[in-house]
Amino acid sequence: MPSHLTRHVFRRLLANEPIVHRGCLRRRGIITAAYGGRRQTKASCQDIQTPSAVAAAAQRRAFFDLTMFRKPKTNLKAPDMVAGLDKMRELEKLQRLRARLPSQKEISKAIKAFIAAKVKSDRSLDDIEASLLLRSIQYCRELLITDDNVSIGTTKMWPGLHKVAASHVSLAFELHGMLNESSSPTTIRRVHCMLCQTLCHMGDPDRAKNLQTAFERTAAARISPNTDPDVSGAEDDAHDTSSHVVSGKEGQLHDCNVRCWTDIISAYARLDRDLEVNLCLELAKQRGLADRSDRLYRSMMFASLHRGNLQEVQTWWGKWYSMVSRHARGRSMGSFTGEFARSVMELLRWCATSGHISFGHDVVREILQNNPVKPIWDAIFVWAAATGKGVDEIGRMIEVMESADSSTSSSSKRRQADIATINALVECAISKEDPYMAERFIALGRERGIEPDAKTYVLQIDYRLSVGDIDGALTSYQNLQSTDVSSEEDVPTVNKLIVALCSSKRYDFDTIMNVAADLSDRRARFEPQTVTTLTLLHLDRDEVQDVTDLLNTHAYHFSSAERAGIRDALLAYCLDPQAPLARTWDAYTILREIFDELPRQPRTQLMSMFFRRKRPDIAVHVFNHMRLHSREDTIPTIDTYVTAFMGAARLKDLESLELIHNQLKLDFNINVSTHLRNALIIAYTACGKPRKALSFWDDIVASREGPSYNSIHVAFRACEHAHLGDIKAKEIWAKLLKMNVELDRTLWGSYIAAVAGQGNMSHAAEILAAADKKGELDVDEHVLGSLFMSTPSPVKQRDVEVWARDKYPQVWGSLMEKGVKELENGARVLKGIDRSCIMTGNATEVFGITELAEQILLALPMRDLLLAQRVNRTFHDTIASSPRIQEALYFRPAKEPNTDINPLLTRVFNVTEAQVRLHTLHVVTQEASSNGPWIVGQKLSLGIALF
């Protein structure tokens, strides 16, 4: 059996695939006989070779199933998104690509499904979802303008004030703009309150105030408050039967207006705008808001509390408490046990932490006069613990409260310490960073027959983690699992526990996964830090599928800031030089697939990292991913191409260089500049293509922008390695001399190296000696070192060494003192000489017009500016494209006194005052017609003194 046939047979056997030889005539005859003995005609043979016929007669090996040794195929979990979100993401992408968009009915259906799912999940709207929802609503606004369910649903899932972003503000304005005559009173009221509250939180109470006054004049006049069943109880009982917008004949208030004015006044107070605060308070009093609701006074008290103004806190506390007491007349204080008790506890905590103990005692005495109910007693116990009372003393206070209440026969009015009392005391101990006191409070509860509940164990996990007691936290977590957790109050703490378990490096994988699985089974929220920690844990275990499933499950439910945190952690993992390359590539693949919004800069860092790790093939993949992207903040720029070219140059990898260069040729978004061509010269020279590199020098000279100093250096470096490059170097040098370009020692060094690089050491030495004799050059270490290191062979280097030791003994001696490194081929490198070509983005390098040239043009007198515009095309384009210069041309007086440009040129280009002359522009513009359009920018950038 031939060898190729043997390989074919064994490969088929190992893969458990049939062995079918379609070209075997004997095989054809057997199959033909099986199908009725048809003649071997061309048509019949073609008929036999159909897939169904081959499959029917195919051999099968049923005894040995060799696929059992294969790795099973993995099915990745699809991204877990809210219903309708995928369609809105598709719309955003198609709009970005300017492709055919889906129908408005599809997007409208997706919006309704998304809002229904978000409201059902009871989770707020993050900034990414708000941005997508805004774009979708704008796309199908005509279909949704009469649908109040969209606006109502959006208000129900509106986030807390600390999570509001700019996209939420835009969405609120869009919904407000959709209000019309057919909108229901509920919709108008909810959207208006949402917009005012958002504006106040974003620091724009002026606009919120204008909206509120307009609302009172127009929209609110048409609203009947009894038609809104979803608003709070204060609004349900309100009536508006007169021409007044806010208060009617009975003096009842709309809760919407109370909320809006409260938010506006609080926002002004946070901004320390006392004048506006007093003005809005007066407006609220005129509308009857201040006398009908305690919300305004309470908000002002907390605004003063956050500002730390004790006098204002005392004032607003007195007004608020007197109003609460007046409303409670004839009723028990139990009517105010909820919000009132929480407010008192927060006030007392502020007094304890800020050191206002005397005022706190006054508050407690004032409250005790009204026979407080049990929740307020809890606040008093917390105040006692915060001011230094011990656990035993608080225990005696509890006994006093219970004994004073023993005469009460009604069980509903009894004041007995319960687990809420213990939890409040534990929270106080945690705020004081005293875990021992917290443990004693829990023990105090057990002594009194009060067993811990779920919140107690959550607090216990929290403070044990704060002191690094992870074992104790695990014990509390096990106790927590035996309790009834009806809400998700334990989820943030369990997330902290998972992070602590992963960070400690002392617990096995199963222990961590058991805790994480509990949250996953409950479909609870994984915090971004938890997802990040578990992602890195799976990556370290090479569990790529688990990483993908984890991120697909949770990453699409985070805000942009939360996604950025996970993304940065993955990026740091990829950039870690100690990470294995295979894991780095897996992490990058996950990063690219799930975090499509990854911007250009981190992608460029990843590309550079793969170049540094000597994997240009992977670096080219990263570059192509940027190249194929549709986002403007991701597609490559000139700097990206320069970074890629320099990476290929360091590795001398011609294949990757040509691949990226071909992409540049097809990239219509890039205008090739001198900076980019410089990188191409360096890259092709390093990759052994100096002749091709010199073609880019010709392109630079022919361009309007012209060369830079770096262009000359890299061109000389290409001449140094190109065949007969000394001839090209002499041409470049002659042109520089003709144009009176200032030749510093670095240019001399590059030119001498270009001549010596062809092995013509004697001619290079003659040029150097002649320049030294004429005083054009002071031979220093850089020039002499460049000559030595550019010599192509060790033999020639010894000749240069003999000549330099004889001609310039002091300079050569100082070079030898810095040290010499010998390479494998026998050549030597001087340690004190740096001949690397570094690409920089400094605008002063470019001979053409830059932002600095724009500054110079702005400093010129009017007549010089008009002359530059008239004579040279480069200046003309710059002036035409600069709004600032155009403004100066139109608004600057014609007889403006001459502006001295010398100090500006001295500051910008770091040249001496003697090198700069105001007549430079006139002479240069006269030469522009004969020497090329780039000469003007070249003269200005170099600061040449032309007389």
Image (cartoon, rainbow, N blue to C red):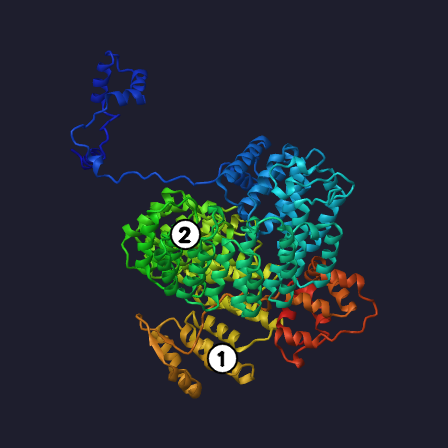
Q: Quadrant of the N terminus?
A: top left
Looking at the image, is 549 positioned above or below residue 892? Answer: above
The location of residue 870, given as percent across then percent down, is 75, 62
Amino acid at pointer 2? Lys
Depth check, front residue: 638 or 694:
638
Q: Residue at x 25, y 14 (%)?
A: 35
Residue 544 as seen in the image, left or right of residue 433? left
Q: Which residue is mark 2?
A: 455
Q: Quadrant of the C terminus?
A: bottom right
Residue 11 quadrant = top left
The Cα atoms of the two marked residues, 1 and 2, are separated by: 85 Å
Depth check, front residue: 622 or 275:
275
Q: Residue at x 58, y 41 (%)?
A: 154
The location of residue 204, given as percent across then percent down, is 67, 55
Q: Residue at x 46, y 40 (%)?
A: 81
Depth check, front residue: 144 or 665:
144
Residue 582 as seen in the image, left or right of residue 415? left
Residue 467 as seen in the image, left or right of residue 150? left
Amino acid at pointer 1? Leu
Q: Which residue is mark 1?
A: 768
Badge nearest the viewer, 1 or 2: 2
Q: Is residue 644 visible?
A: no
The location of residue 558, given as percent across then percent down, is 48, 48
